[in-house]
Amino acid sequence: MRERFPRSLPLSTIRLTTAQALVRYLAAQQAGDGQPLFAGVWAIFGHGNVAAIGEALHGVRDRLPTLRAHNEQAMAHAAIAFAKASNRRRMMACTTSIGPGATNMVTAAALAHVNRLPVLLLPGDVFADRRPDPVLQQIEVPGDATVSANDCFRPVSRYFDRIARPEQLLAALPRAMAVLTDPAECGPVTLALCQDAQAEAFDWPESFFAPRRRSPRRPRPDRDELQVAVERLRAAERPLIVAGGGVHYAGATDALARFAEAHGIPVAETQAGKSSLPHDHPWNLGAIGVTGTAAANRLAAEADVVLAIGTRLQDFTTGSRALFRNPGRALIGLNVQGFDAAKHAALPLVADAREGLEALTEALSGHRAPRDWAATARDARESWFREAASFTAPTDAALPSDAQVIGAVQRATGPETVIVGAAGGLPGELHKLWQAGAPGSYHLEYGYSCMGYEIAGGLGVKLARPKAEVVVMVGDGSYLMMNSEIATSVALGLRLTVVLVDNRGYGCINRLQGATGGAAFNNLLDPAHPPVDFRAHAESLGAIAEKVGSLRELEAAIARARTADRTTVLVIETDPAISTGAGGHWWDVGVPAVSVREEVRAARTRYDEARANQVLGG
């Protein structure tokens, strides 16, 4: 009898170790434009990854470069910054040994989780067969033998898996890619790799390693949600747009500009959203919130409809829920993730930012906000620009302010320069005062406000945009926490300009301490403490370094750094007591209800008054 169906062809397989299969799979992944999805793997080798993963990476080094770093947290920061500067279209992986090498990356994983940024973390893990237990650097929990140090990654990973057998990769890797490239789920993925499993062999289907192109999904808005949003915007007399990082990640900066221009709606920017519009765009009010401009915050207080695009609306954006004060205001959350779209009792509009803006533009055809609102926005913007210029103007003071240093950097660089920063006092001043010339030219990590991100982050930006002029601004506190990737930048030939602002301690926290009534304590170095020779330190890491004595000298030094053959570190001392008083908004920082200090009791009274303005619920 003739067979009705042909027999199955034998499955074509290839015998590889788990580690070899892992890196071959990563090398086969492509971004939407055909470039490798993974630009490389950062690696610090140890006994938990050098034998198997190290051997595997060596075998694919022509397709998947391996980069050597000096600190595991820093290399993960660099990988995250690369993904951010690539608008989440490309990414990097990081591999470490077990124990401290692995847990050093937990902080970076939290940073990526908060900021919705993709990074693949590949820490070594204990032996799956447990034959040599306890191995060097192993964490033992007497009541649970399944726990290892890598379980620390669980709450700060969007997807976590422990690979104890080779064939588990057949399910784990596709799931990891789905999370890393999904605009709503996007965040860190951790695959903890048991040491013995890394080296075990398996017959893998060759089809598993076929090239796969991964283009970002662009969900369109729900018809009913779109109708509600359009009705609210048409009825609005004082509408305001808040642009978040999602505008960049969706490639929606042009769509935002067209929308604001077509409908006459002013735009304010979060830290992640800054540079969505160039600073001189007529509808750009600049930064919003605790570190916002007087223009953006004035209109936020009056707005009756707020269209929040691609932002998770954290407390610095909302002024701890006290910024949007119009009692009848409506909030529309245009966000690719439903969790963020519905925050603060918002009317959700779940969609890709570009698709959502284009749908709104079509539905609002011919509609413009009232002219008097446009005039209010224009007057507030012009008034702020005049005021801000006074804070960044040159000075002959012995110790300039952070704002005056920012002004000097601005004058010495071009509009395409990418400014990089993170924690401390600089982000607040940069958010208010830096004039971003083009989309993507402002790169601040302020979702997790992580000290030590700055230099490693600058390295990641330079990897993503090698032709860009990248300027890192960092305080002395952050520099002392993490500076090792200066040496990495020199080794890789990735030139950065690092402006190190030395105020001898944690200046912004000292100011916050005083503002909440506390005595100056444990933040600034004692005047008798020997000064740190940052110039000599940076030179010891291979960089060119200068200590400058004035703003004029700083501008000249930045010009020299642009033509240098390697990273340059420029050190300038600043006054820790000065910050920009104009702009900004109240921030909820708990003040003690009981204190022997009169200053604290007075600060508590002010605090209670301010909390009365918070809008709770949602």
Image: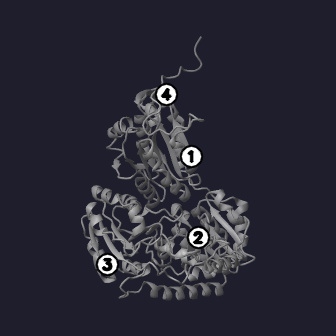
Point out the tag, 1 or 4, that comes first from the N-terminus. Answer: 4
Q: Are marks 4 and 3 in contact (CB under 8 Å)?
A: no
Q: Position of residue 426 (x, y in %)?
A: 46, 73
Q: Quadrant of residue 513?
A: bottom right
> In the image, which disc is placed on residue 397?
none
Q: Say what amino acid the circle numbered 2 marks.
A: Phe
Q: Say what amino acid the circle numbered 3 marks.
A: Leu
539 or 386, which lies in front?
539
Residue corresponding to mark 2: 316
Point out the tag, 1 or 2, that comes first from the N-terminus. Answer: 1
Q: Say what amino acid the circle numbered 1 marks.
A: Arg
Please say if 586 is above or below 43: below
> In the image, which disc is placed on residue 129?
4
Q: Position of residue 577 (x, y in %)?
A: 46, 80
Q: Residue furthest front?
A: 596
Point out the tag, 3 or 1, that comes first from the N-terminus. Answer: 1
Residue corresponding to mark 3: 554
Residue corresponding to mark 1: 154
Q: Quadrant of the N terminus?
A: top right
460 or 307, which lies in front?
460
Mark 2 to mark 3: distance in Å? 31 Å
Point out the tag, 4 or 3, that comes first from the N-terminus. Answer: 4
Mark 1 to mark 4: distance in Å? 22 Å
Task: Rate crowding at label 1 as few (under 14), some (14 to 19) or many (20 or more) other CA atoms within 10 Å.
Answer: some
Task: Rate crowding at label 2 as few (under 14), some (14 to 19) or many (20 or more) other CA atoms within 10 Å.
Answer: many
Secondary structure under the numbered disc 2 in the rendered image: helix
Mark 4 to mark 3: distance in Å? 59 Å
Q: Are marks 3 and 1 in contact (CB under 8 Å)?
A: no
